[in-house]
Image (tube, rainbow, N blue to C red):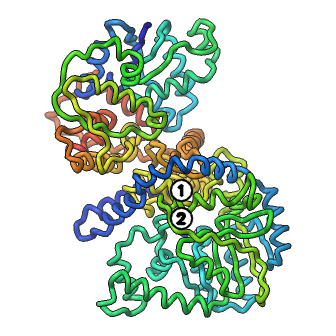
Amino acid sequence: MRVGFFVTCLGRSDAAVDRLRGDQTARDRRRRGLVPPTQTCCGQPGVQLRATAPARRRSPRKVVAEFEGCDYLVAPSGSCSGMIKTALRRPLSATTRRCARGRTRSRQRPCELTDFLGQRAASSHAVPGSLRGQRHLPRLLRRAARDGRQDASRATLLATVPGLKTRRDGRNARPAAGFGGTFALKFGEISTRLADNKCQHIADDAAPTPSCWAIWAACSTSRAGCAGAAT
Amino acid sequence: MQIASMHFKERAHAKHRRRAAPAQPAEDQGQVRRQAARGDDRARRFRGARARPRRRSASARSTTSTSWLEIFERNADGARRDRAAGRRRQPTINAHVLDIAARHGVRKIIKSKSMVSEESELDRAIEAAGSQVVETDLGEYILQINDYEPPSHIIGPALHKSKEEVADLFAQAHGDAAQDRDRASCASRRAECCGTHYLTADMGISGGNFFVAETGSVVLVTNEGNATLTTTLPKVHVAISGIEKIVPTLGGRGDADAPAAALGDRAVDLELRRHPDRDEGRRASSTAPSTCTSSSSMPGAPAVLGSDVREALRCIRCGACMNHCPVYQNVGGHSYGWVYPGPIGSILTPTYIGLENALDLPQASTMCNQCGVVCPVKIPLPDLLRKLREQQFDARLATVVRARRPARAGRGSRRSPGSTRWRRASARGCSSWMGGRETA
C-alpha cells in the first residue's frame, strides 16, 4: 500500500500551530509514503468562493500528476480530502488523462487523516505514547458528519491512546459552524463572534482540559478567528 | 418593504456594536431565543421519524409548474370564487386587493400572516387608501404597532423583541396601566382587542401555504388559529401567495399534506399544535364569494422557474434554515435587508431583486450545510449559494471593497526584505481573486 500525503495549504503556512501539525504528520508519512514537494492548494477556496471553473480544471490534473502511483491520498483536513474526492469522482479531462497515463478515472482514493488511521491503518500502528487527562470530542461539521464514518474513526483512534478519556457532546455542543477559511477573510467580525461562541461553549462545558480540536479549528483555519479567540 | 440588502455587512456590524453596549440587553436575549428556537435535542429526536415525510415533501414540492397554475385558476373559478388572478406583479397586487375592497365597500380589514404582502407593503397601501387594517398574527401585530417595523424571522417576526419591549409597545398602543405589563395581561388584552376586530371587519386577507390546483382550494397552517377566523368571519376573503405555492393535488404524489405537516414541525423544531385549514371557497350564507389572488410577488420570480436556482421555489417558508444557521444567529434577520432572512433569504433576495443589489448575501454563509440538512423539502441551499457565487464571478461583480493600505511609517522604518514583499504581493493578488479583503 503506497500512501500519498497531501500537506494542504495549512501545512505550508507559517503559523506555528500549522507547521507543527503539518511537519509531524508529514514526518510520519514520509517513512512509508510520498510527500510531493510541489503540491499546493486543493482549489477549495476558488470553488467555495466563485472561480469554480478554473479551480476545478486545474486541481485534479495537478493532484493526479503529483500523486501518481499512490493507492491512498491522505490529507489532514476533511474539507480538502472532500474537495479532491469530488474533483476526482468526475471523469478526467483529456489533459488530466494524459497525466494519468490514459486512465479515465483516477486510482487514488482520497481520505482524511483520522479516517485513514482509524479505519485503514489502525491495526498496523502502535500508539507511540500516552496521554493523561480528558479531552473534549467536539462535533464535526454536518456535511462531514453525515455518514458518521469520520466521527467513528476519531473515536476509535483516540480510544487507542493509553490513559486518555474522551468526552462526548456537552450541554452546549453544536455542530461546527465552519467559521474559518474564506468566510473569515470576508466577514472577519462575524467569524470572530462565531469563534468566541465556540470557545464560550467549551468553557461552559467545563472540560478539564481545553479542547485541542476546537482550539485547532479556531486557530488554524482562520487568522481572524484566532485573533477573536485570543481576545 | 424597502430593500437594504446591499448593506449586509454594515447592518451586521451595527448590530454587533449595539449588542456590545451594555444598555441594551434585548439583542442578547434575541440571540438566546433564536438558539432556543433550534431545540437541538428535540430536533435530533424527531429527525429519524421525519426522513420519510421529508422525501414525500420534497417530491410534492418538485412538481410545481406553470401548467398547474392554469388548472388552479380554472378550478378556483369553478369553486365560485370571485376571481382567481394569477401572475400578478408586485406593483399591481396592492391595486388589485384595493380594487376588491372598494367593490365590496370594505372599511376595515383583518390580516393573517402573508410574506407576499410584506414584500409589497400591502398594509401601508391599505392605510394610504383610507381603510383600517389590523394584523391578527401576534408577532405581526407587535411590529404593526411599532410603526411597521420589518420582520426579523419568517415565522417569528418579532423574535428580536424582549417581553419588556413588547409590554412597552402594548402600553403605548392600548394605554395599559403600569401593573398590567406582565405576559398574561398583555396576552389577554391582545385577545380582547382582536376579538372585536374579528367581528367587525369587512374583509380578511390571508396568505396561502399551499394552493391546491385539483380543487382550487387554499391550505393554511397556523398555530394561533387566527387564519381560520380571518378567512371565515369577514364576508370577503382574499388569499395572496406566490405562484410557486401551487401543488397539484390534495392526496397522492403531489399532495399538500406532507409539506403542510412538515411546516409546523420544522418551523420551531417542536411538535407544535397546528391548525391546518382548507378553504374551498364555497359559502352557503355568504353575501360575497371569497377571492383568491395568486401572485408572482416580484418581477424576478417567474424567471426563477427556468433558472439554476429553481429548487429554491420548493421553499415552504418554514424558517428551519435560519433557526439552524450560525450566521443568522449572530447577525439577526434585519441585517439581510429584505423580507426573507437567513440562508433561503440569501438565495431568494438576490434572485428576486437582482444579484447586483445584494452582493454580500450569497457570500454570507459558512457552507456548513446545517440549513441543507434540516430543510424539510430538501433544498440544497449551499449548492444554490455556490451557483449564485459563480454567477457573481462570471458577471465580475466585486463583493467587498479593497483593503485600505496601512499608513507608511516614517523615514526610519526598515524596508521589508524582498521575500516578504513578494509574499505580500502574492497574498494581495490571491485576496483580489477571492473578492478582496474586508476593510479594517
What residue do we see at 20% from left, 46% from top?
A: A206
CA neighbours of label 2 inside 10 A, class few (<14), some (14 to 19), many (20+): many
Q: Amino acid at mark 1?
A: Gly
Picture coordinates of residue B429 (x, y %)?
41, 31
Q: Is residue B58 left or right of residue A213?
A: right
Give the residue at mark 2: B339
Please state which of residues B141 and B363 is positioned toward the viewer in this rendering.
B141
Pointers 1 and 2 in contact (C-beta within 8 Å):
yes
What residue do we see at 60% from left, 15% from top?
A: A105
Picture coordinates of residue A51 (x, y %)?
53, 34
Please state which of residues B252 and B401 is positioned toward the viewer in this rendering.
B252
Q: Is residue A27 left or right of residue A63?
A: left
**Badge 1 sits on which subunit?**
B
Labels 1 and 2 positioned on one and the same chain: yes
Image position of A25 with respect to B126: above or below: above
Picture coordinates of residue B344 (x, y %)?
54, 54
Residue B396 appearing in the image = no
Give the residue at mark 1: B345
Image position of B430 with respect to B313: above or below: above
Lower sequence index among marks 1 and 2: 2
What residue do we see at 50% from left, 75% from top?
A: B140
Image position of B399 with respect to A97: above or below: below
Tag on residue A188?
none
Q: Is residue A212 left or right of residue B316?
A: left
What residue do we see at 69% from left, 82% from top?
A: B98
Residue A61 appearing in the image = yes
Image position of A139 with respect to B29: above or below: above
- 3D distance between C-alphas at marks 1 and 2: 8 Å
**Badge 2 sits on which subunit?**
B
